[in-house]
Image (tube, rainbow, N blue to C red):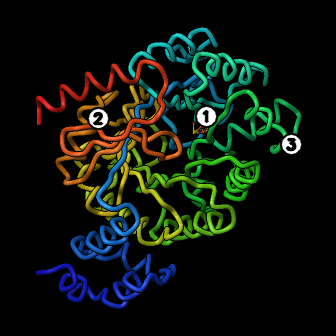
Amino acid sequence: MTGIQWVRSAGLADIADKVHAGVRLDEADALRLLRSQDMNAVGWLANLANERRNGRRATYILNRYINYSNYCILSCAFCAFSRKKRDADGFELSAEQMVAKAREALALGITELHIVGGLHPSLPFSHYTGFLRALRALDPRLQLKCFTAIEILHLAWLAKKSVADTLAELKDAGLASLTGGGAEIFSKDVRARIARGKESAAEYLDVHRTWHRLGGRSTCTMLYGHVESLEDRVDHLRELRALQDETRGFTGFIPLPYQPENNAIPVRTAPTGLDQLRTVAVSRLYLDNFDHITAYWVGMGLKMAQLALSHGADDIHGTIVEEHIFHMAGAKTPQMTAEKDLVRAIREAGRVPVQRNTFYEAVRVWEETAVVGVADVPSGGDASVERHRETVDAGG
Ligand code: SF4
């Protein structure tokens, strides 16, 4: 069957007409697509929408995660990461320890540090601006993507300043982008069940709105596959699309499949493969004002992320190097993926691999076995990429 035949036999011809005509899908369309059992039809449509926007290119980033601490004053039910001061496996890093990790990362050619932590009970605001300044001093081209919306509210409370003034101060210290974490699911009822005490949906959106108004960019997320309904997912996407209409400040959307271990939510399985692919595909189709949809390999696994590249995703995220949050919740994926494996996964999916920076701008384009186009990257990058290129070329 051809794609259009799949779509007709799935009863989705009217939605296909909208996609072809560039007409915005509504919430009822998104719900029908999420309920559809015909993955071929939904995936084909999402692939169409993605290729129209991004062509055959698919991106990845050389990044390193740093969690500065897992101490947190909250106790979100889904969280396997946070610890109290009394816990033996709590940790916090000094600015010097963070700089040491960043130095190692720079030697690997990494362009972005992704830095988040719990809501620490006692560190002062100056600690956060201090580590940002220390990291920026290492190499000003290193992009610091830091903090979730709830961390920003916590920091504003510590600084005794408005959110706007807090963000401006963090930006001055080196903050390049906010992370998208902490969105979970916007539904008030679901939030009360999985993240009691956390910021409301309105607060999450307002932190990002404020950041965008300061000229900042950020990503956004949705944690799905736990106790929420499909209607809740659509409602979540609706809120994100509305803010994007207003600010155009989101660079990309990252759907995060729930990891079921070591937490208090009574859901024992992660979302199935089809659910993950469908959620990526519907995100691509519904979020028509977002340029990029990420298949997050840490949560999906690299094989599933690779498949998602033909179901609407155009990005498979990054090298990561050291991940705690998903792995403490039971993720079975490795701690890191080498650049050569990301490039190979993208190439095998029939796409052109493109190394991107934090803002999804191309750093390197891998046409066939050659690199064409190299943008300015932090020191260490060139040698590392050349090394990886040899490996990729040798391995096909
Ligand atoms: S999800 Fe974030 S805010 Fe909630 S307990 Fe975990 S670290 Fe704290």
Residue that carries the numbered disc 3 in the rendered image:
162
Residue at the (53%, 67%) spot, across then down:
289
In the picture shown, does residue 249 fall above or below 147? below
Q: How far apart are marks 1 and 2 (CA)?
A: 25 Å
Amino acid carrying label 3: it is Ser
Near-viewer residue (15 or 289): 289
Secondary element under disc 1, as helix, strand or loop, is strand
Which numbered mark, 2 or 3, is in the foreground of this view?
3
**Residue 299, x across and y down, in percent:** 36, 43
The disc at residue 332 is 2
The quadrant the C terminus occupies is: top left
Q: Does the residue labelled 3 lie within 8 Å of ligand 1?
A: no
Disc marking residue 389: none
* Cα–Cα gap, marks 1 and 3: 18 Å
The image shows residue 41, relative to residue 84, as above or below, that is below
Of 186 and 391, nearer the camera is 391
* Residue 146's disc number: 1
N-term mark: 1 or 2? 1
Whether 167 is drawn above or below 237: the answer is above
- Give the image location of residue 118, x and y in percent: 62, 30
Beta carbon of the mark 1 residue lies under 8 A of ligand 1: no
Q: Quadrant of residue 262?
A: top left
Label 1 close to label 2 by CB (< 8 Å): no
In the rendered structure, which disc, 2 or 3, sits on the residue that comes first in sequence? 3
Q: Which residue is drawn at 45% across and 69% down?
A: 230
Q: How many marks?
A: 3
Give percent across and percent down for residue 171: 73, 35
Name which residue type carries label 1: Cys
Q: Are marks 1 and 3 in contact (CB under 8 Å)?
A: no
Tell me the SS state at disc 3: loop
